[in-house]
Image (cartoon, rainbow, N blue to C red):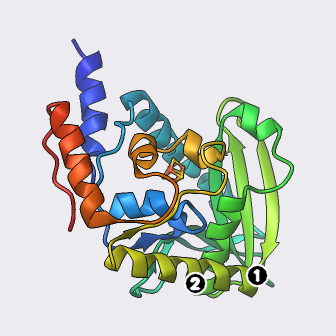
Amino acid sequence: MLRERIDQYYLDQHKDREQHHFYISDAGKCSRAIFFKFKNVPKKELEARILRLFEHGNYIHQLIMRPLLSMRDIHVVASEVKIPPQELISGRADVIISDGKDLYIVDIKSMNSMIFRGLEEPKEEHINQLQLYMHFLDPKKGILIYVSKDNQELKEFQLDYEPKRVKKLLAKLKNLKTKIEANIIPERLIDWPKNWQCKYCAFKEVCRMTGEGEIGWKDFQKKIVAHNKRYGKVISLRK
Ligand code: SF4
């Protein structure tokens, strides 16, 4: 009686929203997948179970925030800190702390224990996000806290600001913005389909239909609409 309705609740909460600017979490990710998100290409539906796992990540944030707020020698300066509004990208850092001498941006990530156990260095995509927070917000020092979802173990990595990395990330996003506006689907990842992003990509099928190199969006979208019609789906894509 309840199971289906609970599942539906999570699926409804996660209906595709139109994207109009980049999120910090897009930095360093596959340009083609971001292009498809901007153009509202239908994604493979995420199961309600996976959506509940995402939501679980929010509770883990609270588990870390409570002890941070109770520390005497660490002061929580602000939490959920939005980067200053600008055209290209938006994002919200988890928390800024002070140890009385320096300020740090802290980003909290959770993962299953199997991935957690093998984690000796922070993940590239998380370094990229934290670097952008450091770029747009004042503290130029950052800490990544990893939480194992299954056994609650923690790992911590401190990072300094890397302007060269940030410059590259922003240049890549600006280049992608130009392609989105010019309706050019970017080329797929060089190590497709082995790249970890391809493994979890919600646009796998469309990407396969697109082929390897850059291609015009206008012609290709006719192909996607026809393909979905064949399966009884009517979709609306952004021009
Ligand atoms: S399948 Fe891989 S290359 Fe294709 S859009 Fe997804 S992440 Fe990018």
* Up-down relation of residue 51 to residue 235 (above or below): above
The answer to which of 143 and 165 lies nearer the viewer is 165
Task: Name the residue rendered at 29%, 46% in the picture.
Answer: 42
* Up-down relation of residue 80 to residue 37 (above or below): below
Q: Which residue is mark 2?
A: 171
Q: Which residue is mark 1?
A: 162
For this view, does 48 lie left or right of residue 65? left
- x, y percent for residue 114: 74, 31
User: Callout 1: 10 Å neighbours few (<14), some, many (20+)?
Assistant: some
Instruction: Let me know if residue 137 appears in the view.
Output: no
Give the quadrant of residue 14.
top left
Numbered disc in front, either 1 or 2 = 2
Does ligand 1 reach within 8 Å of label 2's beta carbon? no
The disc, 1 or 2, on the residue closer to the chain's N-terminal end is 1
* Up-down relation of residue 85 to residue 67 (above or below): below
Task: Name the residue rendered at 76%, 40% in the picture.
Answer: 116
The answer to which of 98 and 58 lies nearer the viewer is 58
Q: Spatial distance from mark 1 to mark 2, Cα to Cα?
A: 15 Å
Secondary-structure class at tag 2: helix
